[in-house]
Amino acid sequence: MTIAELSNVPKHVAIIMDGNGRWANERGQPRSFGHKQGVEAVRTVVRAAGEVGVKYLTLFAFSSENWRRPEAEIQDLFGLLKFFIRRDLAELHASNVCIKVIGDRYRLASDILNLLLEAEETTRNNGGLVLVIAFNYGARDELARAVQAIARDVEAGRLEPGAVTPEMISQRLDTAGIPDPDVIIRTSGEERLSNFLLWQSAYSELMFVPEYWPDFGREQFFEAIARYGNRVRRFGAVTPPAVAGSQA
Ligand code: IPE
Ligand code: IPE
Ligand code: MG
């Protein structure tokens, strides 16, 4: 699969990066080894997304439910995010990547919060790929925070309850201003969303691939983009049937 063969490239690709632990287990290694290798896959896929002309790439890095994991593993994952930003921020900035973070950032420790803010601040005016990092993110938590914001507006008399629209809800989500994902890819063979972008995925194409995240590279990414190109999206409407001999 080469870039030239790809058509109908999605504007926004979101990825549930799953399977680091199993990848490591199969190699007789601790889960942390898989997470470390997962960071290399992030690098590869960010580059590939930029090359192929994807405009938004959202990566699910830590869910609001991942706090249920052992403390040592949580610390590993936080350490790797810090490592990734410290090591790659300059290069991402030089490549014109704009970083955005979604999730409940204000419940994070100050060192990690400051790094995330620095990454956003440094790259805020970049016009290239928008890399959205979902960290301490859960769709239900995000929706609850949006509902709180709406309730505050109603309480203050700025908004009538009957005037609330789907667009207003979208504007109060962490993803405000970011188009809904065209495709959500999940690696490792699991076929569920695990509380990822529940509102935004209303019409996303879902794609489940067997590779564990550390094994998901350029080739697999391009393959997924090619598969997306063959999907027919209807958004509730009907696709006009192809008419024989028509020029349309
Ligand atoms: C994905 O890999 C990374 C995160 C969830 C942070 P996992 O750690 O979930 O790996 P598996 O699914 O247990 O193999
Ligand atoms: C989803 O993966 C979260 C991330 C990829 C960050 P999990 O491994 O946490 O999901 P479940 O627990 O298998 O549903
Ligand atoms: Mg998992």
Image (tube, rainbow, N blue to C red):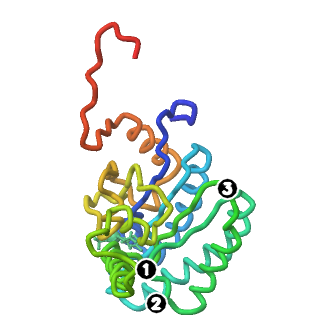
Residue 146: x percent and y percent? Answer: 37, 77
Tell me the amino acid under the disc marked 3.
Answer: Gly
Disc 1 marks which residue?
136
Residue 42 image offset from top left, x and y in percent: 54, 62
Question: Crowding near pointer 3: few (<14 within 10 Å), some, many (20+)?
Answer: few
In front: mark 2 or mark 3?
Answer: 3
Ligand 1 visible in quadrant: bottom left
Judge from the rendering whether residue 136 lies leftward or rightward of residue 133; answer left or right.
Answer: left
In percent of width and height, residue 228 lies at 39, 41
> Which residue is denoted by mark 3 in the rendering?
127
Distance of label 1 from label 3 (alpha carbons): 26 Å
Q: Tell me if 157 is positioned left or right of 219 in this view.
A: left
* Residue carrying label 2: 107
Q: Is residue 13 left or right of residue 128?
A: left
**Residue type beneath disc 1:** Asn
Few, some or many residues within 10 Å of mark 1 (<14, 14–19, 20+): many
Query: Which type of secondary structure does the marked residue at label 2 adopt?
Result: helix
Secondary element type, mark 3? loop
